[in-house]
Image: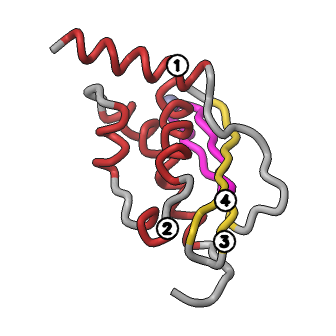
Amino acid sequence: MSASSDLYQEQILDHYKHPRNKGPLPGASLQARDSNPLCGDEVTLRMKVEGSHLISEVRFEGRGCAISQASASMLTTIVKGKAVRDAEALDRDAILKALGIPLSAARLKCALLPLNVLKLALGNKTDVGV
Ligand code: ZN
């Protein structure tokens, strides 16, 4: 058990140190930002949506603890190339499964911040339609 939990921990550190899809995204069609004041985490998520259905590009910017930033990095890899409706259907279980380690209530807020930002961004969609 502890061996696999170590593996996940390594994965989290790897995403934290080498975040995927991090940086600005000029011309993004969706974006949102939120923070977790309890821990000082901040995450901004930007996406490009093709034909209002497919998330062709996603980038994040942020700062904060390893859990929040690794979770944001993992979320971008999950969401990129997905249909908007699949991204909308992502729930906390998908994130917790990706992180793979048990989290305290405080850490849960860190882990789920990027998902909240994703939901905000999808809600900000200006495109009319499905
Ligand atoms: Zn945090």
Q: Amino acid at mark 1?
A: Asp
Q: CA distance from mark 2 to mark 1?
A: 27 Å
Spatial CA distance of label 3 from label 4 is 10 Å
State yes or no: discs 1 and 4 in contact (Cβ < 8 Å).
Answer: no
Which segment did they paint magenta? 31-46
Residue 115 drawn above or below residue 17: below
Read off the residue under disc 2: 83
Instruction: Please give the name of the residue rendered at 82% of the width and 62% of the height, measured from the top-left corner.
Output: 27
- The reply to whether callout 2 and callout 4 are in contact (CB within 8 Å) is no
Label 1, label 4: how far apart the Cα atoms are: 23 Å
Q: Which residue is mark 4?
A: 47
In this rendering, the label closer to the viewer, 1 or 3: 3
Placement of 118 over or under 78, stated as above or below: below
Q: Nearer the viewer, residue 2 or 40?
A: 2
Residue 70, compared with residue 85, is above or below; it is above
**Circle 1 Cα neighbour tier, 10 Å, few/some/many (<14 / 14–19 / ≥20):** some
- Please name the residue shown 43% across and 45% down the image: 112
Closer to the N terminus: mark 1 or mark 4? 1
Q: Are marks 2 and 1 in contact (CB under 8 Å)?
A: no
Q: CA separation, marks 2 and 4?
A: 12 Å
Q: Earlier in the sequence, mark 2 or mark 3?
A: 3
Mark 2 neighbour class, 10 Å CA radius: few under 14, some 14 to 19, many 20 or more:
some
Label 1, on which residue? 14
Instruction: Report, in whole angstroms, how far the alpha carbon at label 1 lies from the one at label 3.
Output: 30 Å
The amino acid type found where label 3 is placed reads Glu
**Ligand 1 near label 1 (Cβ, under 8 Å)?**
no
To which residue does mark 3 refer? Answer: 50
